Amino acid sequence: MDMKTVLVAVCLLLVSPITGHWWAVGSHVVMDPTLVCKKTRRLRGRLADICKKEPALLKEISKGVAQGSKECQYQFRNRRWNCTNVRRSLKKVLMRDTRETAFVNAITAAGVVYAVTRACTMGDLVECSCDKNVKGRGRLGVLSPDHAHAATAAAATPASGAAAPGDWEWGGCGDNVNFGYRKSKDFMDAPYRRNSDIKTQVRRHNNDAGRLAVKNHMRTECKCHGLSGSCTLRTCWRKMPPFRDVGNRLKERFDGAAKVTPDNDGHRFQTEGPTIKPPGRADLVYLEDSPDFCRPSRSTGSLGTAGRRCNATSPGVEGCDLLCCGRGFDTRRVAERVNCQCRFRWCCEVTCSTCLVRREINTCR
Ligand SMILES: *[C@@H]1O[C@H](CO)[C@@H](O)[C@H](O)[C@H]1NC(C)=O
Ligand SMILES: *[C@@H]1O[C@H](CO)[C@@H](O)[C@H](O)[C@H]1NC(C)=O
């Protein structure tokens, strides 16, 4: 299918009132999760359950959305599109299906998995608790906790602690990631449940890629027991990776995202060229090329880069050349008082003097 056909398809979708409604709901999921419950006219199924019966869960979902948004801003802090949550911009980004849309949806879905799972572990939700499904014990070196979990943990890290021989058993309070995964899916995918058009496919795929960035990268943590830390017995549990790792992983997927087009019956997507390998479940996919985000634009939601700080010597995306889109930049010299020559004095005090440092601040024209 050529680009023109895709554009026509996309435009048709845009004017379809039903899809339009679901889209609005879809962007509420990211911008204000509690609005989903208010704006969805006929709440049904699992989404209805969450909205009506599980206010504590809804609160964790909102926290997850906020965590996703914060991580998005960190990952894109030095780029032209900086994942701003200025509503008029974000709304437009969420209506499209660019790489940026893919990332926002994925990191949001991941944030929801994360927050809900953590709430389970902390005992903040009555619906769930620690993961009690992993049971059993073994001898280190014969069957390590990581091997036991090889099927569910694609990239488990080696158990921490000394590699001394000894027994281990599952214990402690493991992260119940399957519950978080399920609830993230119930909530995030609800607007897209009944549609099978290409945009819906892409959104569901990217949401899932985000969830898998947490679920497929669980770690094993262990604690030693035994006389004076001899580690004759260890208890181990499953733990989510730090959310920063999830963000980094999804950022890599953003960089390698695959452009897809609808296949002949329009219900599935395929990669553009026959040579590109089909995207896996954990990869991000997109339908439209991104705008350059250089200038403010009402239609794309770009805020432009004028006034953004840039690095005059860097050749990368944060460098003034790229960030300012060739418009040039202004340089300001500032002097700042900072703590310096700090010394640790026994015990327990740190003394510093103040120094004046001069810095150059470059901002895009
Ligand atoms: C993101 O970029 C916009 C304009 O491009 C700017 O106004 C805003 O301050 C930036 N946000 C952050 C967190 O840097
Ligand atoms: C600017 O970029 C250069 C080269 O990449 C780097 O060494 C330097 O630390 C950067 N400066 C700031 C203020 O980030």
Image: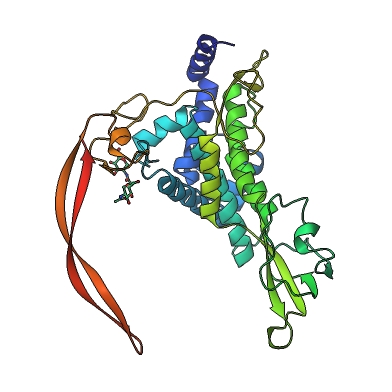
Visible residue check, residue 227: yes
Q: How is the image coloured?
A: rainbow
Name the image quarter holding the C terminus.
top left
Q: Nearer the viewer, residue 357 or 292?
A: 357
Q: Is residue 68 above or below residue 290?
A: below
Q: Residue at x 81, y 66 (%)?
A: 141
Q: Is residue 107 above or below residue 67?
A: above
Q: Nearer the viewer, residue 142 or 262?
A: 142
> Which residue in the rendered view is the most extreme toward the bottom?
347
- Determine the quadrant in which ligand 1 lies: top left
Q: Residue at x 63, y 26 (%)?
A: 195
Q: Nearer the viewer, residue 348 or 176?
A: 348
State which quadrant residue 118 falls in.
bottom right
Residue 363: horizontal and vertical position, in percent? 22, 41
Q: Nearer the viewer, residue 76 or 132?
A: 76
State which quadrant residue 19 falls in.
top right
Q: Is residue 257 above or below residue 123?
A: above
Q: Give left or right: position of 199 versus 178.
A: left
Name the image quarter holding the N terminus.
top right
Residue 198: horizontal and vertical position, in percent? 60, 22
Q: Give left or right: position of 328 versus 5.
A: left
Label total for image: 0
Residue 245: horizontal and vertical position, in percent? 54, 52
Residue 136: horizontal and vertical position, in percent? 83, 66
Visible residue check, residue 43: no
Q: Residue at x 66, y 43 (%)?
A: 46
Q: Residue at x 58, y 43 (%)?
A: 210
Q: Give left or right: position of 54 versus 247.
A: right
